[in-house]
Amino acid sequence: MKNALKAALPLILCLPAFVAAADPPKRCRNENLRGQYVFTALGFQRAPDSAPGTPWFPKAILEVMQFNGDGTLTTPQLAIANPPGDLGVVVSPPAGGAHGEYFVNDDCSGTVHFFDAGNVTFKIHVDRREDTIRMIQTHPINNVFQGTGKRVD
């Protein structure tokens, strides 16, 4: 009996590691992205339909995004510094902001699409703690623009 216990003890002590390894990784879904996030981004852009070789100019955004947990979002606040054709002025679009949609894949990657005149689209990655979103703009194509959204509520 004593020898059987000695033989079984290492297996019993390793059991928690086997159980933890068997836990499936957390899956992301639209429902995981819920609440208000402040998105700050820096980058460069050219005016829409610019010819190749057109100079790039800096751009910055400070935006509040409200993710509703159902794949829809709104942007109640937005400030853009140096939009196309501008000379460095910070503009704030009308109150109410743009509406849009988002989709989060099982691996926490996804997309954000705004229903604005520019049809602006981002590739995203949602941190597994769901408090940070990393975003890079993919449309319109005359942008090199990326930033991070931090949950505030």
Image (cartoon, helix red, strand yellow):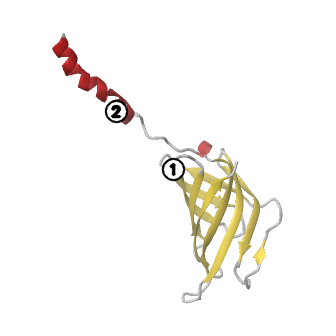
Residue 109 position within the rendered picture, expressed as x and y whole percent measured from the top left: 51, 54
Name the N-terminal-most of marks 2 and 1: 2
Judged by depth in the image, the label closer to the viewer, 2 or 1, is: 2
Residue 102 lies, with reference to residue 138, above or below; the image says above
Q: Is residue 96 left or right of residue 149?
A: right
Residue 81 position within the rendered picture, expressed as x and y whole percent measured from the top left: 71, 75
Q: Is residue 16 left or right of residue 146?
A: left
Residue 113 position within the rendered picture, expressed as x and y whole percent measured from the top left: 64, 60
Q: Residue furthest left?
A: 3
Residue 12 lies, with reference to residue 29, above or below; the image says above
Between 124 and 60, the one nearer to me in the picture: 60
Residue 148 lies, with reference to residue 103, above or below; the image says below
Q: How many marks?
A: 2
Number of the label disc, if any, that sits on residue 30: none
Between 116 and 130, the one nearer to me in the picture: 130
Looking at the rendering, which quadrant does residue 17 occupy?
top left
Between 123 and 23, the one nearer to me in the picture: 23
Q: In the rendered structure, which amino acid carries the disc numbered 1?
A: Cys
Residue in view at x 66 percent, y 66 percent: 119
Residue in view at x 65 percent, y 82 percent: 47
Alpha-carbon distance for marks 2 and 1? Answer: 25 Å
Residue 46 position within the rendered picture, expressed as x and y whole percent measured from the top left: 62, 82
Write down the residue under mark 2: 17
Label 2 sits on a secondary structure element that is helix
Crowding at mark 2 (Cα within 10 Å: few <14, some 14-19, many 20+): few
Q: In the rendered structure, which amino acid carries the disc numbered 2?
A: Ala
Q: Residue furthest right?
A: 95
Residue in view at x 75 percent, y 61 percent: 98
Number of the label disc, if any, that sits on residue 108: 1
Label 1 sits on a secondary structure element that is loop
